[in-house]
Image (cartoon, helix red, strand yellow):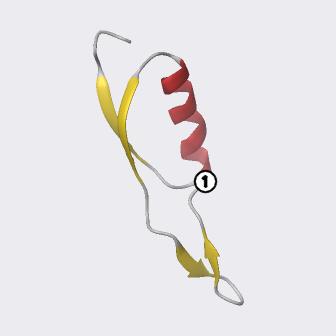
Amino acid sequence: MKDELRFVDMGTPEFAVEPLRRLTEGGYHVVGVITMPDKPAGRGYKVQYSP
């Protein structure tokens, strides 16, 4: 791990996934991920899940 650096990621949109993936692959220690709750959206109010 990178000198015991630990962090929490806060991001929901799909563009937040790739930076998080690169950090974890780079050896950083992710202690948590905070996202928006799943909620109904669009026509028919289908539940939209976080990526």
Q: Residue at x 56, y 25 (%)?
A: 22
Left or right: 11 with respect to 13? left
Q: Residue at x 44, y 68 (%)?
A: 37
| Relative to 4, residue 48 above or below | below
User: Residue 35 is drawn in which quadrant?
Assistant: bottom left
Residue furthest to the right in view is 43
Residue furthest to the bottom in view is 44
Q: Residue 38: image x %, image y %?
A: 51, 70
Q: Residue 29: image x %, image y %?
A: 38, 24
| Relative to 7, residue 16 above or below | below
Question: Which amino acid lies under the numbered mark 1 shown in the image of this protein?
Answer: Pro
Residue furthest to the top in view is 3
Left or right: 51 with respect to 28? right
Q: Residue at x 41, y 21 (%)?
A: 28
Q: Give the residue number, with chain letter if any, for mark 1.
A: 51
* Helix, strand or loop under label 1: loop
Give the quadrant of the N terminus: top left
Left or right: 22 with respect to 7? right
Q: What is the crowding at mark 1: few (fewer than 14 residues within 10 Å), some, or many (at least 20)?
A: few
Left or right: 34 with respect to 5? right
Q: Residue 19: image x %, image y %?
A: 54, 33
Q: Residue 39: image x %, image y %?
A: 52, 76
User: Residue 3 is drawn in which quadrant?
Assistant: top left
Q: How many numbered marks appear?
A: 1
Q: Residue at x 49, y 25 (%)?
A: 23
Residue in front for this viewpoint, 7 or 16: 7
